[in-house]
Image (cartoon, grey):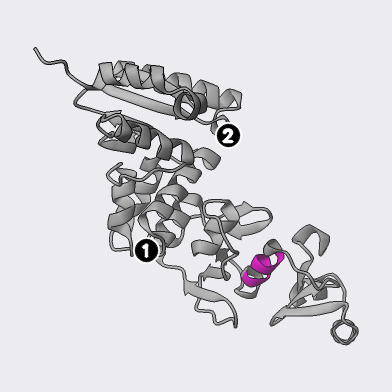
């Protein structure tokens, strides 16, 4: 039972499995059961993982509880850094020492998902819940990761945001979804923008912008140019290859010219790329 749940069990599950109250007390005395929260135990291990801590916190908050906030974003891989404290959203008011708890609002009542065996809020709901807790660049990176890892489009998050317009950070999140936040999401993008600046070329007015329900890396609407920056990390599967071809066709369909640049184009041999961009972005004097 514990093996299937990162080494975590509840008192009610033990009793249902036939372990008696006295046997639970005995195992607690011997240390083969270790208290994590009230009526939630680790089975015989003293080095809990992130998953076991988070699952224990969710179980301590009862049926229907979901890991949420920055903790959910961390587990989902949307934010990096040190493991945040457990945050749990539950259908009823809960107070669990060491756990940040929130009561689930009616607008939060969508189904959760399972991530590494832990019940968590859906990816769009997670992004909405952290909108007021992260700075603009960190939130933009989280939105980017949501698209890369889970195929979440800006429209998916915007639809939820419409139902919760007063959520903290809503204005910031909406600006990011609409491409109005001039942030770079990777070293590749940062260096690309630096190359533009060094060569006296205009930076794209729209970056990571929602165009036709799909995010594009860089777009100059006035000049009718879309640029995609290809990192092998995000373009190494058949699905990614098909998606990239579709984006190219969509750019031409809306009347844009289209260019795709790689790590080597940006970091190693930028001369041809910059010559091409200069011809596309700088209108010659008549």
Badge 2 vs badge 1, beta-carbon distance below 8 Å: no
Q: Quadrant of residue 281?
A: top left
Residue 6 showing in the rendered view: yes
Residue 42, x across and y down, in percent: 78, 73
Q: Quadrant of residue 107?
A: bottom left
Depth check, front residue: 233 or 22 = 233
Above/below status of 91 relative to 73: below
Residue 233's label in the rendered image is 2
Q: Is residue 31 left or right of residue 268?
A: right
Residue 185, x across and y down, in percent: 43, 43
Residue 282, x across and y down, in percent: 21, 21
Quarter holding the N terminus is bottom right
Depth check, front residue: 29 or 77 = 77
Residue 222's label in the rendered image is none
Depth check, front residue: 44 or 265 = 265
Q: Residue at x 21, y 23 (%)?
A: 223
Which residues are drawn in magenta?
52-57
Q: Residue at x 50, y 26 (%)?
A: 268
Q: Is residue 12 left or right of residue 286?
A: right
Q: Residue furthest left?
A: 286
Label 1 residue SS: loop
Above/below status of 72 relative to 204: below
Residue 132's label in the rendered image is 1
CA neighbours of label 2 inside 10 A, class few (<14), some (14 to 19), many (20+) = few
Q: Is residue 66 left or right of residue 6?
A: left
CA neighbours of label 1 inside 10 A, class few (<14), some (14 to 19), many (20+) = some
Q: Residue at x 63, y 53 (%)?
A: 115
Residue 25 belongs to magenta span:
no
Q: Nearer the viewer, mark 2 or mark 1?
A: 2
Above/below status of 118 relative to 143: below
Q: Residue at x 54, y 22 (%)?
A: 241
Residue 215 showing in the rendered view: no
């Amino acid at each position: 039972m514990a093996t299937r749940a990162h080494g975590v069990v509840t008192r009610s599950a033990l009793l249902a499995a036939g372990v008696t109250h006295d046997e639970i007390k005995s195992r607690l005395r011997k240390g083969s059961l270790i208290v994590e929260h009230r009526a939630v135990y680790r089975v015989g291990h003293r080095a809990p993982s992130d998953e076991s801590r988070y699952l224990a916190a969710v179980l301590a908050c009862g049926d229907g509880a979901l890991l949420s906030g920055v903790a959910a974003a961390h587990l989902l891989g949307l934010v990096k850094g040190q493991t945040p404290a457990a945050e749990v959203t539950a259908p009823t008011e809960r107070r669990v020492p060491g756990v940040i708890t929130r009561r689930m609002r009616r607008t939060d009542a969508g189904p959760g998902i399972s991530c590494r065996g832990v019940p968590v809020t859906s990816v769009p709901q997670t992004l909405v819940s952290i909108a007021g807790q992260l700075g603009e660049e960190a939130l933009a990176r989280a939105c980017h990761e949501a698209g890369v890892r889970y195929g979440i489009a800006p429209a998916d998050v915007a639809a939820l945001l419409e139902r919760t317009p007063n959520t903290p950070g809503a204005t910031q999140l909406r600006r990011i979804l609409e491409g109005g936040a001039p942030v770079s999401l990777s070293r590749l993008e940062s260096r690309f923008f630096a190359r533009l600046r060094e060569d006296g070329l205009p930076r794209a007015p729209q970056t990571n912008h929602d165009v036709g329900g799909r995010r594009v890396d860089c777009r100059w609407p006035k000049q009718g140019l879309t640029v995609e920056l290809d990192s092998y990390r995000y373009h190494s599967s058949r699905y990614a290859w098909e998606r990239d071809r579709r984006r190219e066709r969509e750019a031409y369909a809306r009347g844009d010219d289209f260019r795709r640049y790689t790590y080597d184009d940006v970091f190693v041999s930028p001369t041809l790329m910059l010559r091409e961009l200069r011809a596309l972005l700088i209108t010659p004097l008549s």
